[in-house]
Image: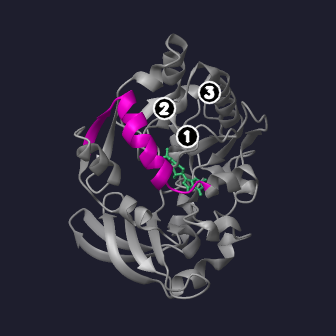
Amino acid sequence: MADTKKRSLDSDNGTESGPEKKLASGDGAGKDTKKPTADPGSEAGSVLAGFQTEKIMRESSREKNIFIHGKMGSGPNEGRDAVLILEKTPFREDSLAELFKTSELKLQMRNDIYSTYHLHPPTHLNDIKATMVCPATEKHIKKYQSQELFLIQESGEDYRNITLPYIQEQSFSVQWVYNILEKKAEADRIVFEDPDPQNGFVLIPDFKWDQKQLDDLYLIAICHQREIKSLRDLTREHLPLLQNIQQQGQEAIMKRYSVPSCRLRVYLHYQPSYYHLHVHFTVLGYEAPGCGVERAHLLSDVIQNLQTDTQHYHTRTLTYPLRADDALLHKLREAGRF
Ligand code: G7M
């Protein structure tokens, strides 16, 4: 069995490596992002130079990340709203020897057998993952703000009467998804593709994963069919698609990363952020955001539920969390459903 903790991708034969491109195209806040940047890596420095912080939306010293709302300082998006997420990347075992050899070490204090230091590694060993959404809509800005969560029990009827009209009106653009399917963005990152229009999909690293190590492995499978919004649309007729994603997705991950299916958590979100069907593949042991029981539905359970009852996701009450400021929560409250 693969020991994902001990492996780093740059050091593995036949696995993905190379410099991670930062500041990749946004998630399609509008039509502006239809032409993705050819080489997003090259713009990084200048893009951030004039970035003006408006508000720190969230910060975690434990997770070593910070979510910033700001305005772009220069370039084609000057003055526009942006969300910038900065995150310290995990340590890589294969670079420890180099880290010890090349870093500057400054003693902070010494007491008996105890000492603490400031370690200053060379730049290439001191990465910060930066994710930018620009131009960011109000919905994006809200998405990253810390908020109290409330659990919703949504019946099939609630979905049709309240949720569906709401998502048809208000959901995030899925332009970034179409860019991937049409090879207009991230084409060089595709791990596997089954081009079949009915049952095919593209398997690609999630943009939360920097692909430098396997202990936070995170890929998404995006189906070629464009009409399936979420779990709620699934019936027995989608079983070949779901089984195909499960089987070929797991095989592709085994082939590329040597992570076997028994080490993978394969699931869908309900509610998702983006209403184009996609499946998450994360490695067990990594607590990926959104992998909790209140949001993640294991693909193998989804398949079984549909085998038992084709109407399962049309009729069943589904439970999920919504943020206090979510407009859907207000709609459900107005309708007396919360
Ligand atoms: O199920 P839900 O809609 O919440 O998940 C969408 C997933 O897509 C998340 O895990 C995001 O990190 C990922 N994602 C979002 N965007 C905008 C991109 C993108 O542009 N590229 C890639 N590769 N993943 C994305």
Residue 321 or residue 67, whichever sits in front: 321
Ligand 1 neighbours mark 3 (CB distance < 8 Å): no
Residue 145 or residue 95, whichever sits in front: 145
Q: Mark 1 points at which residue?
A: 229
Chain-order first, disc 1 or disc 3: 1
| Residue 267 drawn at (x, y percent) | 50, 33
Residue 75 or residue 259, whichever sits in front: 75
Q: Distance between the residues labelled 1 and 2?
A: 8 Å
The kind of secondary structure element at disc 1 is loop
Foreground disc of the pair 1, 3: 1
| Residue 147 drawn at (x, y percent) | 26, 57
**Does residue 235 appear in the picture of this structure?**
yes
What's the magenta region?
Answer: 150-174
Q: Mark 2 points at which residue?
A: 232
Report whether 297 appears left or right of 213.
left
Ligand 1 neighbours mark 1 (CB distance < 8 Å): no
Quarter of the rendering occupied by the N terminus: top right
On screen, residue 85 above or below 203: below
On screen, residue 268 above or below 310: below
**Residue density around tag 3, few if under 14, some if 14–19, many if 20 or more, within 10 Å:** many
The residue sitting at 46% across, 25% down in the picture is 313
Q: Mark 3 points at which residue?
A: 242
Chain-order first, disc 3 or disc 2: 2
Name the kind of residue labelled 3 in the image.
Leu
| Residue 159 drawn at (x, y percent) | 40, 35
The kind of secondary structure element at disc 2 is helix
The residue sitting at 58% across, 66% down in the picture is 30
